[in-house]
Amino acid sequence: MTTVEIEAPIGQPVDDQLFRTWFRRQASSVVVVTVAGDPPAGFTATSFTSLSLHPPLVSVCLNRDSSSWPAMVRAGHIGVHLLGADQSAVAGTFATHGIDRFAAHRDWRYGPRGVPLLDGALGWLLCRVTQFVPAGDHAIVIAAPLLGSHEPAGEPLLYHDGHYTRPAH
């Protein structure tokens, strides 16, 4: 019987830098999550996904050190806006720290339950927050969609390799 040596896999321990770099290579759709309040809160996220069809559930992750976290914890409802390929400025505004994001982005209105709804998005969902799941320095926010709207056409804004981009065809 012949013995075959198997070369050990080449790699390195996963530290903060490798972890960030690895996930920057993953293309993600970009959403803005809005929360009712005085003032309202909102943030850009790339960690949004469908979670369940029966019952309909979605999830978004938020750093618990975020300026939006206190409003999120108090929120009974949130708005989730799927941004279009031409809305990188909107994503940038809601990702900027230390500004009044709703004063900087004026294309919005109050929707049901006082949740801000952004104009021009490819689609939006109004969701009831059902659960917070602590996960490291973040929390997974689970929510049940109640109302929604979408545009029949248009491309989503993507985040890839540290930049906003659009799908290549």
Image (cartoon, helix red, strand yellow):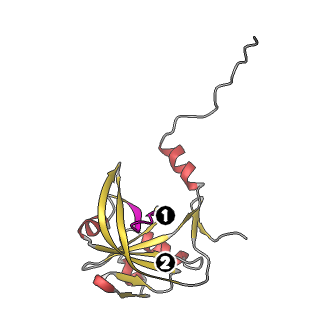
Q: Find residue 149 and report its horizontal and vertical position in percent.
A: 47, 83
Vertical comparison of 15 with 22: above or below? above
Residue at 60%, 54% in the rendered image: 25
Mark drawn on residue 21: none
Q: Which of the two labelled residues, at mark 1 and mark 2, occupies the earlier sequence position?
A: 1
Q: In which quarter of the image is residue 8?
A: top right
Magenta region, residue range: 50-61
Local SS, label 2: helix
Q: Find residue 108 and report its horizontal and vertical position in percent.
A: 41, 87
Pointer 1: what residue? 46
Q: Which residue lies furthest to the right in this view?
A: 2
| Horizontal arrangement in the rendering, residue 76 relative to residue 138 (left or right) | left
At label 1, the amino acid type is: Thr
Q: Quadrant of residue 70?
A: bottom left
Mark 1 to mark 2 CA distance (whole Å): 14 Å
Mark 2 Cα-neighbour bin, 10 Å: few <14, some 14–19, many ≥20: many
Pointer 2: what residue? 90
Vertical comparison of 59 with 113: above or below? above
Residue at 49%, 40% in the rendered image: 15
Local SS, label 1: loop
At label 2, the amino acid type is: Val
Residue at 35%, 77% in the rendered image: 100
